[in-house]
Image (tube, rainbow, N blue to C red):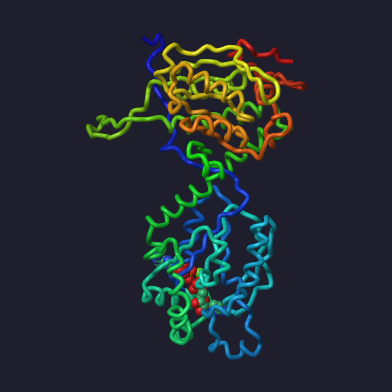
Amino acid sequence: MDSLPELDLSLQSNGGPHSSTLPHKQPFVIGVAGGTASGKTTVCNMIISQLHDQRVVLVNQDSFYHPPSVEKLKRIHEYNFDHPDAFDTELLLSCMEKLKNGEAVSIPNYDFKGHKRSEQARLINPSDVFILEGILILHDPRVRCLMNLKIFVDSDSDVRLSRRIQRDTVERGRNIENVLDQYTRSVKPSFEEFILPTKKYADIIIPRGADNDVAIDLIVQHICTKLGQHDLCKIYSNVFVIFSTFQIRGMHTLIRDVKTTKHDFVFYSDRLIRLVVEHGLGHLPFTEKQIITPTGSVYTGVVFCKRLCGVSIIRSGESMENALRACCKGIKIGKILIHGEGSNGRQLIYEKLPKDISSRHVLLLDPILASGNSAVKAISLLISKGVPESNIIFLNLIAAPQGVHAVCKKFPMLKIVTSEIDASLDDHSRVIPGMGEFGDRYFCTDNGCTTPNFHPTSPFLGTPK
Ligand SMILES: Nc1ncnc2c1ncn2[C@@H]1O[C@H](COP(=O)(O)OP(=O)(O)O)[C@@H](O)[C@H]1O
Ligand SMILES: Nc1ccn([C@@H]2O[C@H](COP(=O)(O)O)[C@@H](O)[C@H]2O)c(=O)n1
Ligand SMILES: [Mg+2]
């Protein structure tokens, strides 16, 4: 029998686990094609507003219209703006190549009234997501090759024509006669000859354009999932990186900064730890439960697994205990101390684990997964105590690829939940870029600590200097 009260997971993560994110080097490129006035620009703006936490840049194919020569401008009513040759695709390709290489580019702004590039160009910075939008954006195979997701907006042609009349007379300096004449002479024939045939390249076709909220929601979810997939998450299905937002990156920026004060380091580490713990809890099993609300109505919900325990790897892991206690009232927390210099020869120095640990789901706590040697030792101990591998969730703030490989290869059934995966390890097995000695910074035992923030949970805690 437990001497502690039954566990109550008083706070839970909002929904299931996100198989998520990392800043990745290559941007996610989406192509959005469709006939004129089908709602491409409107759909793109809706996607961008729903991806509010990501850096998303919209690049319109219109920006790459060739400016017609003076001769052609004189007979502009004969010009076909809906033909693939109307666009400077070479310029589009070279801009995209620079952006993909992390360089900023200047792209033209297009003036539909004067049929020319505006004086003022638009500076575009490298970004997480680029949306390329335009009637013929799926036409050139080289442009299609840049895309991770291809969308075709499919709206009824009568609706498109009426919207085009409205838009072009209000926004593009045309009259109804111009619009109808251009539509029958070049817009409609080119749609049939060049634009409609590109629908077959689309991964997703959106009927009814911007009215199709469901399709737009699904697309946004798909983009979020894809953005969150670090390469290691693709290799190991048991690695989960929490969804990266500017908030999370901001907190990482603070705790990784060598100049950050001790107080801020502890404050922002605690915030990040809480997020990781909440995500970790989202991976626990649950069963369905119906309850009656005060209005007498039935609510079908879930109850979480109550047989839990935390195990912190001393000393840094102890920094995660408060967050776990705050989420899981009365949770038992065991401790493991492993010691060893260099990359080999880790030894178990101390362990204090609940007697019934084999029947519990274990949240193993260590903010940094570096070489993985200590983690492998700790996990092996848990397994030797009878904890099923699949009942272990290993929670970190940052993980090095080497540590992820070491743990996942040996224990493919456990789950790792982390907030960022770093680039590498240095010769001293320190995570790079990393955040230095987490335990020293958190417990204020490094040199120069002026504002001790004492967390007296560990029998092994050094004396603050
Ligand atoms: N679902 C919709 N309902 C009403 N008006 C719309 C809808 N989608 C687009 N529009 C309007 O139709 C016009 C054309 O839409 P737009 O997004 O510019 O199309 P595209 O970029 O494909 O040419 C715009 O004036 C826009 O405000
Ligand atoms: N000077 C120009 C350039 C283009 N067009 C028309 O714009 C349409 C593309 O923009 P959408 O937002 O409608 O996709 C295309 O159909 C061209 O006919 C123009 O009228 N004048
Ligand atoms: Mg548009």
Residue 27 drawn at (x, y percent): 59, 54
Q: Residue furthest right?
A: 448
Q: Residue at x 52, y 50 (%)?
A: 52
Q: Which of these two is toward me, 79 or 142?
A: 142
Residue 57 drawn at (x, y percent): 58, 58
Q: Residue furthest left?
A: 296
Q: Residue at x 64, y 80 (%)?
A: 67
Q: Residue at x 54, y 61 (%)?
A: 147
Ligand 1 appears in which quadrant?
bottom left
Left or right of 121 on screen, residue 391? left
- Residue 202 in which image quadrant: bottom left
Quarter placement of the N terminus: top left
Q: Residue at x 68, y 24 (%)?
A: 441
- Residue 271 in which image quadrant: top right
Q: Does residue 173 appear anywhere in the picture?
A: no
Residue 236 vertical placement versus 345 (above, below):
below
Residue 20 vertical placement versus 73 (above, below):
above
Residue 206 drawn at (x, y percent): 40, 63
Residue 445 vertical placement versus 397 (above, below):
above
Number of callouts: 0
Q: Which of these two is toward me, 16 or 58?
A: 16
Quarter placement of the C terminus: top right
Residue 456 drawn at (x, y percent): 61, 13
Q: Does residue 255 appear anywhere in the picture?
A: yes
- Residue 463 in which image quadrant: top right
